[in-house]
């Protein structure tokens, strides 16, 4: 076989290799798995720095606005008040579909009975949750996305979904199942 005839086969072999990669991507979506792995690896590095920034603030009493959902379990749009790292007050939108509606206090007995674990939405508990999920993620990571406040270190966005990797042989139910956004953190006197 001459060098010239080998070069004639190159386009065919390249096309077959490219076609094979496209089929694997369509069937199994390994790029999504790689994205998850890189995201969790970055989170493993960022989480300790964010926790250190938060702890350096020495804030244990604060108000924090929260929006989010855990499908079929929890839908929240309101504000929490935390004292000594414990949830002490919950105020939710009067009409969750109207962002401009006022906040109404929710009795402690009602929020403790709720399937939405509001006490787990404090800064300290969210750090515990993310640390546990990062530890359990393993090498391939998982569909966990977290962003931190650049100045204070607290979690500003949390997205987590327990879905199989995409592709025709492992279809994803949804991009993200559980999500919470935390904004407008205000320190208060104890």
Image (cartoon, grey):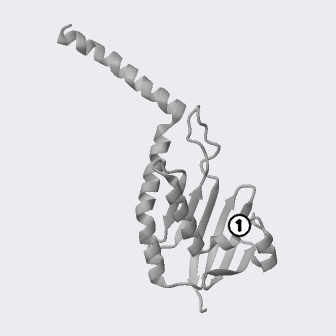
Against 48, residue 73 (above or below) is above
- Residue topped by disc 1: 76
Q: Position of residue 161 (x, y in %)?
A: 61, 52
Q: Position of residue 92 (x, y in %)?
A: 74, 73
Label 1 SS: strand
- Direction from residue 73 to residue 19 in the image, left or right: left
**Extreme residue toward the top, this view:** 1
Q: Residue at x 47, y 73 (%)?
A: 51
* Res. 151 in view: no
Q: Position of residue 115 (x, y in %)?
A: 76, 64
Determine which quarter of the picture holds residue 187.
Answer: bottom right
Against 98, residue 107 (above or below) is below
Q: Position of residue 78 (x, y in %)?
A: 69, 73
- Direction from residue 91 to residue 132 in the image, left or right: left
Against 102, residue 69 (above or below) is above
Q: Residue at x 75, y 55 (%)?
A: 72
* Res. 74 in view: yes
Nearest to the observer: residue 79 or residue 110: 110
Name the quarter where the C terminus is drawn. Answer: bottom right
Q: Residue at x 58, y 32 (%)?
A: 169
Q: Residue at x 23, y 9 (%)?
A: 5
* Crowding at mark 1 (Cα within 10 Å: few <14, some 14-19, many 20+): some
- Counting every numbered tag in the picture gives 1
Against 127, residue 1 (above or below) is above
- Direction from residue 26 to residue 68 in the image, left or right: right
Determine which quarter of the picture holds residue 71.
Answer: bottom right
**Extreme residue toward the bottom, this view:** 189
Name the quarter where the N terminus is drawn. Answer: top left
């Amino acid at each position: 076989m001459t060098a010239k005839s080998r070069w004639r086969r190159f386009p065919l072999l390249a096309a077959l290799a490219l076609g094979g990669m496209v089929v694997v991507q369509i069937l199994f979506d390994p790029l999504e798995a790689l994205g998850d792995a890189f995201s969790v690896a970055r989170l493993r590095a960022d989480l300790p720095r964010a926790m250190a920034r938060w702890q350096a603030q020495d804030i244990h009493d604060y108000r924090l606005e929260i929006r989010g959902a855990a499908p079929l379990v929890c839908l929240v749009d309101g504000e929490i008040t935390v004292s000594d790292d414990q949830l002490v007050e919950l105020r939710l939108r009067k009409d969750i579909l109207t962002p401009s509606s006022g906040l109404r206090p929710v009795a402690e007995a009602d929020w403790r009975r709720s399937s939405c674990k509001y006490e787990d939405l404090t800064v300290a508990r969210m750090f515990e949750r993310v640390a546990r999920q990062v530890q359990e993620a393993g090498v391939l990571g998982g569909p966990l996305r977290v962003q931190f406040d650049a100045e204070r270190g607290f979690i500003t966005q949390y997205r987590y979904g327990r879905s199989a990797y995409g592709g025709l042989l492992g279809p994803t139910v949804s991009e993200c199942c559980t999500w919470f956004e935390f904004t407008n953190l205000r320190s208060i006197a104890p």
